[in-house]
Image (cartoon, coloured by chain):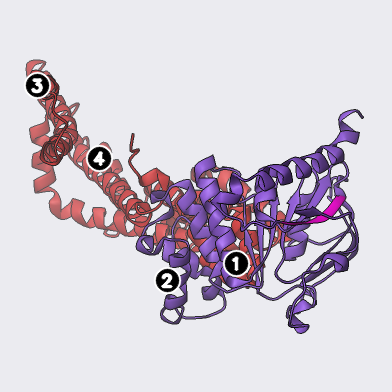
């Protein structure tokens, strides 16, 4: 595979041809195919290696189940895992949405006046630097339901990266553009809507990507802290439960679902970021040289 | 070509048929600006801008020419003296309300807006709909030769084209006064000459008043019919004189003996202004 790859450009060079549109498109297609297939190959070979190690060493399934057993439990325990996955997804997305509204709104409020910022920013920092696992027990006491407590925990964690990125973005608006708006007699509101919000969009998107990942982590950590059981529990509880019952294959299945959810959230936020910025922002552009 | 001695602005007023139009646009009297760090950016500047003038503020960096331009635009307060805009509507903050446009050294375009959207900005802020503004936007873009690029984003344009968009945005409101702060300093010489010709053509065809900040003697002598030479530390006016030429300002003028002479005389004024401090 590598050989044929190396060969293609060489033959093109020897013919002293400029790459035509078609070959460029073909090259792009091949590049895209490779970027998808290479990681897949690596993952596949790791799974094969896992299978071989488990079979050759005859490792008992309650210590390390083979990949086949994990798939088995994923299918057989689907009726248990799916509701749990749904709970975790719901908490993560809801807390992320709240963090977006709260963080964005708070950032706009903070940059309105230096005094508001002086008054509120330290509290935001204290909230951020205190480990969520340490606040979780308190939140669990005061929150009306466990679900609400999990939601608050995930919100607190996802809130700060969105807030601090937004504040940074709102403060980094091009001074000349601010002068221009002032010169044309723009109102505060117009400056916010037409200038400040669009120009801090890249910062907001960074906050969204970080916040999305953190919301999931916080939702899981908070559920560990809550240790709640029953019908309304998320994947974290299923993880703990599987551990207590030495049902390691289900533990792996839960872990697989958590990781998939994380990847999905990352892909989604990355796509939103690309989609909103690709027409104008440097971060989403390919360098043309 | 005549370079008159420094005097009050009234003595070298161009004769105008309409007396109402000869009200000054801007009157700066003994304006001083001190920055918050204590630097005296501008000291005791008195200048009157009359309609139809093409004034060039010429001087070394740090002479306060950009500060003076910002003050004329109503951007940033003054520490002492007074400034008045007799020909403009004044808003509640005591500043001119519209009718003044500013072209910065950088194109200062919004990267998330197309060329059209960027030129639309001044009218959008006035609450004019996109549709109603469309015709004027397109004609402003046409006047800088960019009508075909109205859908492009700023990143797709060259430096000179971005600057043209910036000029189109300044012209779209049909202002009385156009302020330009070293607008072409970052461009290559060829683009710069082309844009200088464009600005001159716009000045001639629209009768707009221009105040143009530059540190280039050649640009000053090519464009302006009045030159204000400034000196640094603290920034102040050193000399203020009209520059009238018998030739039309175009590519012929650029290679003429008269232009060469104008350059050398303006250059002499500038080195006179800088002379004192170089030995200080």
- A47 up-or-down from A234: above or below: above
Instruction: Please tell me the numbered disc located at residue A255.
Output: 4
Tell me, yes or no, whether the two marked residues, 4 and 2, touch with CB atoms within 8 Å: no
How far apart in space, not on screen, are marks 2 and 1 (Cα)?
A: 20 Å
Query: In the image, A150: left or right of A58?
Result: right
- Pinpoint residue A30: horizontal percent, then vertical percent: 12, 35
Q: Is residue B122 left or right of residue A111?
A: left
The chain letter for the residue carrying disc 4 is A
Q: Which chain is purple?
A: B
For marks 3 and 1, give the one nearer the viewer: 1
Do the residues at discs 4 and 1 belong to one chain? no
**CA distance separating discs 3 and 2:** 49 Å
Q: Which residue is mark 1?
A: B204
Dot 3: what SS? Answer: helix
Front position in the image: A125 or A7: A7
Return the residue at label 2. Answer: B138
Q: Say which chain tag 1 marks.
A: B
Residue under pointer 3: A11
Q: Are marks 4 and 2 on the same chain?
A: no
The chain letter under disc 3 is A
Between tags 4 and 1, which lies in front?
1
Does any portion of residue A169 appear in the rendered image? Answer: no
Q: Which residues are magenta?
A: B238-244
> Do the residues bearing badges 3 and 1 touch, measured as CB atoms within 8 Å?
no
User: Looking at the picture, does residue B172 appear above or below residue B4?
Assistant: below
* Residue A289 appears in the picture as rendered: yes
B240 magenta-colored: yes
Could you tell me which secondary element the residue under label 4 belongs to? helix
| Whole-number angstrom distance, CA of label 4 to CA of label 2 | 58 Å
């Amino acid at each position: 595979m590598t050989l044929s790859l190396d060969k293609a450009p060489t033959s093109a060079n020897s013919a002293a041809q400029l790459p035509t549109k078609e070959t460029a498109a073909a090259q792009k297609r091949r590049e895209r195919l490779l970027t998808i297939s290479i990681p897949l190959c690596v993952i596949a070979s790791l799974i094969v290696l896992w299978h071989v190690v488990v079979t050759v060493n005859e490792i008992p399934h309650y210590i390390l189940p083979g990949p086949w057993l994990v798939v088995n439990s994923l299918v057989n325990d689907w009726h248990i895992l799916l509701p749990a996955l749904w709970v975790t997804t719901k908490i993560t997305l809801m807390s992320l949405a709240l963090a977006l509204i709260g963080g964005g709104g708070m950032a706009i409020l903070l940059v309105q006046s230096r005094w508001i910022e002086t008054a509120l920013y330290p509290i935001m920092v204290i909230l951020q630097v205190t480990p969520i696992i340490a606040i979780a027990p308190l939140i669990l006491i005061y929150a009306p339901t466990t679900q609400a407590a999990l939601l608050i925990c995930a919100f607190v964690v996802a809130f700060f990266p969105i807030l601090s990125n937004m504040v940074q973005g709102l403060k980094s608006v091009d001074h000349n553009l601010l002068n221009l708006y002032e010169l044309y007699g723009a109102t505060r509101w117009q400056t916010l809507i037409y200038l400040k919000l669009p120009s801090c969009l890249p910062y907001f998107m960074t906050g969204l990507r970080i916040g999305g990942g953190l919301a999931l982590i916080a939702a899981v950590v908070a559920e560990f802290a809550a240790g709640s059981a029953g019908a309304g529990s998320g994947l974290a509880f299923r993880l703990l439960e599987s551990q207590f019952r030495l049902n390691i294959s289900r533990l792996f299945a839960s872990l697989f679902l958590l990781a998939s959810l994380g990847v999905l959230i990352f892909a989604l936020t990355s796509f939103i970021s690309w989609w909103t910025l690709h027409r104008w922002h440097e971060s989403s552009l390919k360098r043309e040289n | 070509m005549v370079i008159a001695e420094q005097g009050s602005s009234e003595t070298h007023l161009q004769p105008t048929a309409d007396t109402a139009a000869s009200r000054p646009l801007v009157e700066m009297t003994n304006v001083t600006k001190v920055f918050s760090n204590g630097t005296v950016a501008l000291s005791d500047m008195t200048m009157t801008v009359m309609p139809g003038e093409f004034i060039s503020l010429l001087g070394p960096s740090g002479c306060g020419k950009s500060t003076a331009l910002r003050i004329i635009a109503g951007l940033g307060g003054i520490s002492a003296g007074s400034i008045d805009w007799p020909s403009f509507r004044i808003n509640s903050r005591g500043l001119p309300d519209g009718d003044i446009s500013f072209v910065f050294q950088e194109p200062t375009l919004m990267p998330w807006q197309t060329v059209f959207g960027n030129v639309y900005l001044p009218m959008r802020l006035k609450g004019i709909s996109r549709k109603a503004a469309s015709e004027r936007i397109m004609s402003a873009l046409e006047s800088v030769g960019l009508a075909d690029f109205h859908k492009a984003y700023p990143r797709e344009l060259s430096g000179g084209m971005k600057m043209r968009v910036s000029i189109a945005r300044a012209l779209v409101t049909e202002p009385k006064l156009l302020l330009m702060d070293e607008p072409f300093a970052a461009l290559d010489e060829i683009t710069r000459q082309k844009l200088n010709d464009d600005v001159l053509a716009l000045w001639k065809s629209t009768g707009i008043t221009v105040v143009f900040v530059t540190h280039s003697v050649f640009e000053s002598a090519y464009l302006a019919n009045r030159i204000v030479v400034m000196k640094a530390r603290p920034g102040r006016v050193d000399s203020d004189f009209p520059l009238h030429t018998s030739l039309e300002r175009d590519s012929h003028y650029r290679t003429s003996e008269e232009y060469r002479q104008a350059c050398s005389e303006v250059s002499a004024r500038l080195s006179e202004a800088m002379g004192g401090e170089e030995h200080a």
